[in-house]
Image: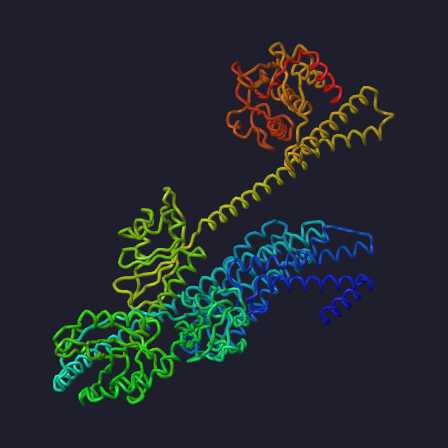
Amino acid sequence: MGLLSVATFVLNALTGASPALAACFVGANLAQVGTFGVLFSRWCPSAWGAGGREPLTGVAQLMRLLAAAVLATGAGALLGPTSVWVLTGHWSWLTALVWMTRNTASILLIAATAFRVGCLVSARRDASSSTSSDTFPNTSPDVGDPTGHAVVAPVRWPRGGQVIELTAALACSVLAYALVFGVFEHLPVAFPLIALSAWIALRFDTTIVLVHDLVMGVAAVLLTLAGAGPFATIADDATRAVVVQLYVTVLAVLGLALAMGRDERDVLLARMELSTAASERSAREADTQRIIAEEQRALAERAHRQAVAARAEAELRGELAQAVLESVEVGIVVADADGRLALFNRAAQAWHGLEADASLDPAEHAGRYDLYGADGTTALEAHQVPLAQVMRTGSVTGAEMVIAPAGRPAVTVTCSGRRMGRADGTPLGAVVAMTDVSDDRALRRELQAARARADEQADLLGAAFDASMVGNVHLDLTGTVLRVNSAAAAMLGYDAADLVGRSWPQVVHPDDLVVRQRAVREFIAAHRGTRTGVASASGGQVRHLHRDGHVVHTQVSTAVVTDKQGQPLYLATQLIDISARVAAEAAVRGQRDVSARLLRALSDLGEGVLVEHEDQITYANDALARLIGRRTPALLALPTSLLLVTEAEQEAWSARRAFAPGQLGATASLVTELRHADGSSVPVEVTTVPLPDAGGRATLTLVRDLSERMRDQAALAASNEQLREANRLKDDLVATLSHDLRQPLSTTTGFAELLLEEWDQVGEDDKRQYLGRIHRAGRWANDLLEDILTMAQLDAGAPAPRTARVHLPALVADVVDRLGVQAPLVDTTGMQDLTVLADRGHLQQVLTNLVANAFKYGAPPVRLSARRRGDQVVLDVIDAGEGVPQEFVPRLFERFARATTGTAADQKGTGLGLYIARELANVNGGDLTYQPAPAGGSRFTLSLNPCTTSVQDPRDLLAHAVTLVHDD
């Protein structure tokens, strides 16, 4: 700020500004910089340059950058030009507009270039220290990269043929600017330069686009200031500055919109590829775990047979019975990547008495949810909360705390949790499991009694029991461990001696304990009295707690051992560790969840997504369904995606799936059309990616709506056509002025000079003749200027008519009288006594033109008639001339249109009269048309809106008279 203030003050002082004015400009610049910084940081907080680390991508962020630039320069404009007005007394809105356009274009180009280069340098520095760059050298770190690096779309530096294309594009840019600003500098043909900017934006990296637009924009401004180019033809300096700066702004916005939109799409595709690769790795790991699990099951079967033989040798008879243990409640807390709460399960909600509040700052969790230390009285600090420890260290095990909300019983829990991440290492959040250990204290008091009972049963297990590779546990009917082999103890991190005598439910996960105990009790009751030694086995998956606190997933088989009378003696349980398989399945589910989120995100961004196996549609998102006016279930029911394509595009649609062997990347984008449900066609751009490991011929297709782009192109073509039409009309006007105006002026000046030089020698008759010709030439020039001025008023906007009642017979008589035409030459016998609602001055000008043209291009007599026709009044002007040449009729009412054959070829005129007459008729709610007269000649028909009240009413006559006096 200090350097900016000094530089602004010194430069303004050196260029002649007073110290006070220079100080005001310092304030204006500081206000502009401050406003831009505040708005850009608020609207784009994650962008590099606004305090974040991400690049500018997408049209939405471009619009925020543009809005911040416009508002910031507006703040500066309020201070700068206003200060000039206060100190000098001179205010100019054009000066303020120059300020805004100049500074907006500068901020847009220079700031965007600086942010882009800075973000690339920062990302390259971070990538050089990140291991992810070694794994994926051609992609940028994702948002969730644990290194915290920014998201940067793959840099499109030109290679191979693109170097030649870039050289050609730059050469074309230099040549085009040289032609437009040098050779054809007086022609308004700057618009082709926009196409060059679009070429660069569509084909090359955003950095190249920014540098190109910056250099070309500076060149356009400098050449215009030097007096070259189409903008230099603008006479006013301020207006010329505004126009050229607006041109530079349009170039910048167009180039950035195309390039940043492409960057946004590339980032999404890169993320999708990373997610797909991670899913494939997880699937392979799941296959490996499945093989290991099958081998473990084989070992378990062999161990089971050995255990049965051992129990037979020890005269233990019974039939194995399985009991299903349903999960018991455990509190689950889930947080997002920022540590904010995302989920409480039912148990956690019951303990806290509250739901998860995502709006809380992590530092507020301990106070809001009444968290205390293990003693139940010391309130936890923010960093001591287990969830905070997980976010900080990555995991926590066995952390004990007390949940004591006011008015609710306190619950003592042990917490275990870990931080979650995606396959590429991006942080996803954290999960903490809370186990209620309030009853554990009471269970420990019963431990000694349980161990005493276990000692009485110690000899029931044989050597085969201890040597088994499968975990074996004998429990009494209360759940106390009687005997456990080394495999089962090691599975839970214990020595066998440590588990004997303990209550087995202590090592069962709380979520599985209650249901499991109920199932075992029911199983025992159902087999009480069975005289076989072992009841039928019952089992399922049960979670156990390792000694270090983590969960061990096991496959459990339990049997009730009975005596000869069928009375239960104890329970025999076998354990197989399946933690690796469960973890693999969870990882696969997590990857599927990430993929589902990514597909939903593409739908939210408006990108249609279509997944096909062979030709059958297996997935379609809501964005695609909305695009073609169908419902998602209806799309999934289609037998082939060809039904979505118009007949003309089906061959191209099928060809998009023709991949080269081993190809993994996306095909080139294809512009095609899809059928809408209403029968119309929707232009789209599709990009197809093969899914080689999805089974069969599977593809993923991204569909982007091109309707808006097509409308923009059509609007641009229409604008270009309007420019060409404006140029043609300008040329016609210049030709008319140079030819038709020069002749009356030459006549006037020539005869005036003759009279001035030879006044005394010229006779009275000649003087009268010369003055008459001067008078007629002056009227000719005046009529020409009146027509041109009227045309200019019509171009600026239709003049609002002063509508009033107009008596047609009176108006016609006044027009004939003003033209000085002899009465016998005009036949008005067909004029009915009618009144219309219109602007009297407009109607007088229209009739004057029509009657004058009838005598000028036609022949007397001229007949005027008025009558009603339906709900309108029509007035005909008919002459007895040769009529309008047939080939000229289509152009009769065009401006500057004059016939080159017939009577009109020898008459003087501008070609504006009939154009103006028809426009004025339209302004008054009517119309003017032409058709040949039945007996030869021309017939012009003027249609008008009638007045509902007869003009013969005395009040109408009075109003009509007042209107005539006012117009005169």
In the displayed structure, 585 sits above or below 681; it is below
Image quarter in which the C terminus is found: top right
- Seen in the picture, residue 90 relative to 424 is either above or below; the reply is above
Please name the colour scheme applied to the rendered image.
rainbow
Tell me if residue 139 comes above or below residue 452 in the rendering: above
Q: Residue furthest right?
A: 760
| One can see residue 163 in this view | no
Front one among 228 and 591: 591
The answer to which quarter of the image holds residue 850 is top right
In percent of width and height, residue 148 lies at: 50, 74
Q: How many marks?
A: 0
Residue 959 in view of the camera? yes
Residue depicted at 77% across the width and 67% down the height:
9
Please identify the quadrant where the N terminus is shown. Answer: bottom right
Nearest the eye: 146 or 774? 146
Q: Nearer the viewer, residue 473 or 806?
A: 473
Percent coordinates x, y for residue 663 in the rendering: 32, 67
Classify residue 416 by image quadrant: bottom left
Which of 39 and 373 lies nearest the eye of the viewer? 373
579 relative position to 397: left or right:
left
Q: Position of residue 913 (x, y in %)?
A: 63, 28
Residue 606 place in picture, x, y as percent: 44, 55
Residue at image x 75%, y 64%? Answer: 26
Residue pictured at 36% horizontal, 58% vertical: 701
Q: Classify residue 99 as left or right of residue 286.
A: right
